[in-house]
Image: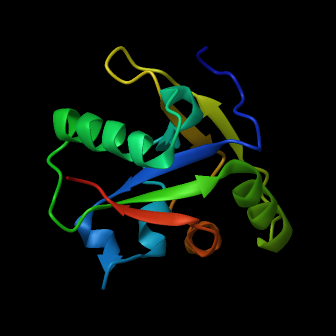
């Protein structure tokens, strides 16, 4: 449901362009909010309704191939919502409290957003990058 808060126990995936990857590692710039964006776009993994991570990643790779021009070096960052929210609230100077909400689109029912990230904030981006659980290729 649009605007529904995603539980802290769940996971999201962030598409990370090749320019935000260095030696296969995801840089904090992958988690920086651009001025025109209201939230950081992610995909809610549990909403994909797949039984394992490999199936979820395949679904995302197919989705990204339809929606984006996926570079050979692009990656998918996997984040646990509760870990991200606690890390940012605990370790950011202003104790930012992030919200993660479901924002489904007609061609992307798992689309979601991480809200309340300050525009162009390197500290919050660095904190999120520190808690990436997994890092997968964005294309098959």
Residue that appears at 32% across and 74% down:
21
**31 is higher (above) or lower (below) than 67:** below
Q: Give x and y (percent) for residue 13.
A: 48, 48
Q: Residue furthest bottom?
A: 23
Q: Measuring 80% from the left and 73% from the top, which residue is drawn there? A: 91
Q: Please indicate whether residue 19 sits to the left or right of residue 109 in the image.
A: left
Residue 104 spot, x, y in % from top left: 48, 21
Q: Is residue 80 above or below residue 58?
A: below
Q: Give the quarter of the image for residue 66.
A: top left
Residue closer to the observer: 7 or 95: 7
Q: Is residue 118 visible?
A: no
Q: Position of residue 16 (x, y in %)?
A: 35, 59
Image quadrant for the N terminus?
top right
Query: In the rendered image, is residue 122 in sight?
Result: yes
Number of numbered callouts drawn: 0
Identify the image quadrant of residue 100.
Answer: top right
- Return the x and y of residue 101 as percentages of the image width and height: 64, 31
Q: How is the image coloured?
A: rainbow
Extreme-front residue of the structure: 51
Q: Foreground residue, 136 or 109? A: 136
Residue at (43, 66) in percent of width and height: 135
């Amino acid at each position: 449901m649009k605007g529904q808060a995603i539980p802290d126990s769940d996971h999201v995936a962030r598409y990370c362009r090749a320019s935000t990857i260095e030696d296969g590692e995801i840089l904090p710039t992958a988690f920086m909010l651009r001025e025109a964006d209201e939230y950081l776009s992610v995909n809610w993994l549990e909403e994909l309704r797949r039984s394992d991570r490999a199936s979820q990643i395949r679904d995302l790779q197919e989705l990204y191939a339809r929606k984006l021009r996926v570079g050979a070096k692009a990656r998918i960052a996997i984040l646990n919502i509760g870990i991200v929210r606690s890390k940012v609230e605990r370790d950011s100077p202003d104790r930012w409290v992030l919200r993660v909400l479901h924002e489904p689109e007609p061609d992307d029912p798992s689309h979601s957003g991480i809200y309340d990230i300050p525009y162009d904030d390197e500290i919050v981006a660095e904190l999120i990058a520190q808690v990436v659980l997994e890092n997968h290729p964005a294309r098959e």
